[in-house]
Image: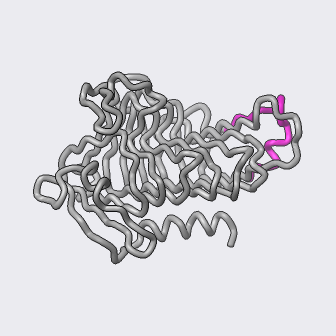
Amino acid sequence: MSWTDHLASAHDSMTQEVHGRAVTVGPSGRYATLREMFANQPGSAMWPVVATLEDGTHTVIQVDSLPYVSVVGTSKAGTIIVADGTSTEVDPVSGVAYADMDRANKHMFKPSGGLSLSTLTINVNEVKYVVHQDSGDAGSVVIDNCILRGHDIDAITGHGLRGGQTFTLTNSTIGALAGGTAPPVVVHAHNMTTQASACGVLVEDCDCEDLQVARLEELLSGQTDDFVFRRCTTTAATALDYDAGTGVTDADPYNVEVTVDDCGTFPLIYDAVNRPDALAHITVT
């Protein structure tokens, strides 16, 4: 199976109707908050958790989420989850107020396995990412049919690709949230020199408004990592920043393959000084 097919399969498996444990989160639900739900409902590949989030505004910050959980909003415009990194609320795990945490250590979700978010409006500020898919975490992350906005963050999503992770972002609108500095990029991903298996990212049917779509850093993983951008739009001056690895002089092996498919105007920049061969690994159709 090609990595493009693998990404599509991962997306389908996380977004299809599943027969697992169905719970409702909200004022009339089994759990009042997403944090409470994640603390009590670990899923599994054979028995995932599907959490329906009631309409309203829900605060979600610094959640190291359990694997195989899908969070589905009641309505995209009406089900809103917010991560406010300036909140004086005290984090129950660290005992530190969110406002006093270094932004580099704050996120909305840091999944330890499969996580799916769909039919939601997601607003974040003063955190690092909406989803931080760290280098030590495996599994697939899917965001589908959402509105994502942020300000004063490092990126909408961040990915340290190491152990076969996949990420798909589909059918969504992504942009700046009023009140601060716009996100520099939607997807920030890098691979690892210690990478154990190939990884992949798919961004498809997304309106990125005036944000850069992706920044990719090539760190010579020893694997072949696939990045696919299909029917993505942006008015930003740069859609894809492909950093071929500052200080990397050995052009072989080269470990990233990029496909840009049916994206219209999709300005590319890449590190032509250190890795002038980068364009050989970008296919535009």
Above or below, 11 relative to 230: below
Whole-percent x, y for residue 162 in the image: 64, 51
Name the residue at 31% across, 60% down.
72
In the rendering, at what x and y percent does residue 169 appear?
A: 49, 53
181 is higher (above) or lower (below) than 66: above
Q: Is residue 280 magenta?
A: yes
Using the rendered view, name the quadrant where residue 97 is placed. Answer: top left
In the rendered image, is residue 158 in sight? yes
Position of residue 285 in the picture relative to residue 173 (left or right)? right
Residue range in magenta is 268-283
Q: Is residue 285 visible?
A: no
Q: Quadrant of the C terminus?
A: bottom right
Foreground residue, 95 or 274? 95
The stretch drawn in magenta includes residue 167 = no
Image quadrant in which the N terminus is located? bottom right
Residue at the outermost left position: 28
Q: What residue is drawn where x is 75% and y is 55%? A: 223
Q: Nearer the viewer, residue 81 or 161?
A: 161
